[in-house]
Image: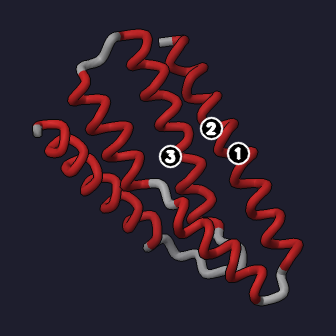
Amino acid sequence: MTGFVFVGLGGAVGALLRYAVSLLPYRGTFPVLTLVTNILGALAIGLIAGAAAKRQAPEGLILFLKTGVCGGFTTFSTFSLEAWQLLEKGETGLSALYVLLSVVFCLAGVAAGMWAASRW
């Protein structure tokens, strides 16, 4: 039962952080804020997973950070909606670029986080 508490509290923190990013004053066509959020989330989850594996972190802390904070912060559903909306607007190239950049940079973020954790 305590696992639910850790995930719930972390999810609240992640959601609040996500909302804070959405308030940044960018209003262009390309969904930069979601892309940046997902890259930061990927970097964070890589760092957390790498550090947890190296340091044997408590399960409650991992649930709070990885499942809660990162899960509440990243925005795959928003990413999917924005990619679809670009397609609906006929912005096929922009949508493809967004999907490509999201996948490539988020994988790079996880790798960078794992690398950073291994250097700790």
Residue sticking out furthest to the front: 1
Badge 3 density bin: few <14, some 14–19, many ≥20, Cα 10 Å: many
Q: What residue did someone put label 2 on?
A: 109
Rate crowding at label 1 as few (under 14), some (14 to 19) or many (20 or more) other CA atoms within 10 Å: some
Taking the spot 62% from the left edge, 68% from the top edge, the residue there is 80
Q: Residue drawn 54% across and 69% down?
A: 78
Which kind of residue does numbered mark 1 sit on? Phe
Q: Judge from the rendering whether residue 31 lies leftward or rightward of residue 53; answer left or right.
A: right
Q: Which residue is mark 3?
A: 41
Residue 66 horizontal/vertical position (percent): 38, 37
26 over 14 or under it: above or below: below
Location of mark 1 (residue): 105
Query: Tag 3 or tag 2, which sits nearer the N-term?
Result: 3
Label 2–label 3 contact, CB within 8 A: yes
The reply to whether discs 1 and 2 touch (Cβ–Cβ < 8 Å) is yes
- Asked if labels 3 and 1 touch by Cβ distance under 8 angstroms, the answer is no
Residue 85 place in picture, x, y as percent: 68, 82
